[in-house]
């Protein structure tokens, strides 16, 4: 960016001109993240502080090459694995139905999409997620949403935001299950989430398959990743 001096006027000192240029540059960047400022520059895989590690060099990245964690014992008599994304949690969905880690049990792969009512990027990709949920469900796949601003970190529900979440779900047609998170869930994976949306794939035991994806994607990009996760 170049500043020109007007001939015949008093020229700004070089230092002052440089400062003005920097202020203009930073002003132009502020708020460029979109609704809520929650969107990172580009979708990426991240080892969020949750027990989910980034892929080893040459194994991962957004090309879907992330590796599953080593097999673990899920325990007898329905005991929840200590590697489960949200632990042994109890919560409710947006319709008031009880939800536990068993929500993952009947599916080989579940795409957990973490979103909020204030996140424009989250809302815009939800119609495509609904289409993916329908298209891949007969292959042992489902999508589950987690609407993180419908409660506080102690699990207290905000009725106004829950109503807004229900309105968004209705408008986008994203009628797959959406969990209203409990305090237990905030004590696990959710405590490390930095961007919205954040998406992570889990197996039938609720354990992460590879690393989390930060940011929204186009339907065809998610489809490629889903194909790879399903193997």
Image (spheres, grey):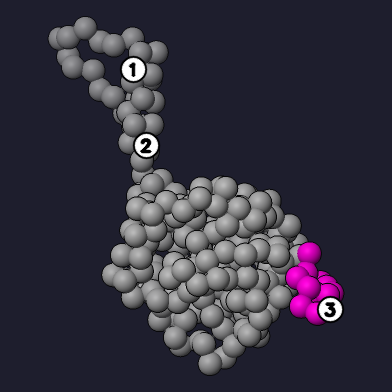
Q: How far is the residue under mark 1 from the one under mark 2?
A: 20 Å
- To which residue does mark 2 refer? 30
Query: Going 71% across and 60% down the picture, which residue do you hit?
Result: 52
Q: Is residue 50 magenta?
A: no
Q: Secondary structure at mark 3?
A: loop
Q: Are marks 1 and 3 in contact (CB under 8 Å)?
A: no
Image coords of residue 43 (percent x, y): 51, 60
Q: Which residues are magenta?
A: 70-82
Task: Determine which residue is flagged by label 3.
Answer: 76
Can I make out residue 42 in this image? no
Quadrant position of residue 20: top left
Q: Secondary structure at mark 1?
A: helix
Based on the displayed image, in which of its 4 quarters is residue 126 positioned? bottom left
Question: Residue visible at 17% across and 9% down?
Answer: 9
| Residue at image location 32% in from the left, 28% down from the top | 24
Q: Residue 121 at what x, y percent from top left?
A: 38, 58
Q: Residues within 10 Å of mark 2 (few under 14, many from 20)?
A: few
Disc ID at residue 17: 1
User: Is residue 37 placed above or below 221 in the rendered structure?
Assistant: above
Q: Nearer the viewer, mark 1 or mark 3?
A: 3
Determine whether label 3 and label 2 are within 8 Å by CB. Answer: no
Q: Is residue 81 magenta?
A: yes
């Amino acid at each position: 960016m170049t500043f020109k001096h007007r001939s015949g006027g008093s020229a700004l000192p070089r230092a002052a001109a440089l400062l003005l240029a920097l202020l203009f540059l930073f002003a132009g960047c502020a708020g460029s993240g979109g609704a809520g400022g929650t969107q990172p520059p580009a979708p990426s895989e991240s080892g969020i502080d949750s027990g989910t590690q980034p892929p080893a060099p040459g194994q991962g990245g957004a090309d879907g090459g992330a590796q599953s964690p080593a097999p673990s014992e899920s325990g007898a008599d329905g005991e929840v694995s200590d590697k489960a994304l949200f632990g042994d949690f109890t919560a409710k969905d947006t319709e008031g139905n009880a939800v536990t880690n068993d929500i993952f049990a009947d599916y080989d792969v579940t795409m957990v999409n973490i979103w909020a009512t204030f996140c424009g990027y989250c809302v815009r990709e939800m119609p495509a997620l609904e289409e993916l949920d329908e298209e891949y469900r007969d292959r042992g796949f489902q999508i589950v949403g987690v609407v993180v601003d419908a409660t506080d970190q102690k699990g207290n529900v905000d009725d106004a935001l829950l109503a807004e979440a229900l309105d968004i779900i209705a408008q986008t047609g994203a009628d797959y299950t959406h969990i209203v998170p409990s305090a237990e869930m905030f004590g696990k994976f959710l405590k490390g989430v930095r961007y919205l949306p954040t998406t992570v794939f889990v197996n039938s035991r609720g354990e992460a398959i590879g690393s989390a994806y930060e940011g929204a994607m186009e339907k065809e990009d998610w489809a490629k990743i889903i194909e790879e996760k399903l193997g």
